[in-house]
Image (tube, grey):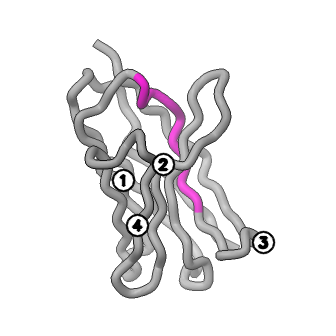
Amino acid sequence: QVQLVESGGDLVQPGGSLRLSCAASGSILRLPVLGWYRQAPGKQRELVATITITSGGTTNYADSVKGRFTISRDNAKNTIDLQMNSLKPDDTAVYYCNARSTDYRQTYWGQGTQVTVSS
């Protein structure tokens, strides 16, 4: 069993930065794809970024966050971080941590952390 706990959500002004962290309990080594998703009010949950657990860590980003967000993972600490820079009001959402198998048969979600970008 894998449990994911997010932290770091906050209220931030446009143009500001925030770092989200996801702590995983249990072994995530058998879940090779780690990622962050978000869901804004009235919208579907969408992919923000993913990173593979293999050495090197292949990353993938939504077009809307490329160049502003950076996903990283620490296999020894079982954490998955999301550094968010140049935040915009459109980034306002609940951000969820995810760990899954490549075939999606096994997938785990955290409880979410609220990010609000507003002046």
Label 4 packing within 10 angstroms: few (<14), some (14-19), many (20+): some
Identified at 42% across, 45% down, the residue is 63
Q: Amino acid at mark 4?
A: Thr
For label 4, the residue is 59
Q: Amino acid at mark 1?
A: Leu
CB within 8 Å, label 2 to label 1: yes
Mark toward the start of the polypeptide (2 vs 4): 2
Does the magenta portion include 93? yes
Secondary structure under tag 2 reads strand
Identified at 29% across, 50% down, the residue is 83
Identified at 34% across, 48% down, the residue is 66
Q: CA distance from mark 2 to mark 1?
A: 9 Å
Res 104 quadrant in image: bottom right
For label 1, the residue is 82
Magenta span of residues? 90-98
For label 2, the residue is 48
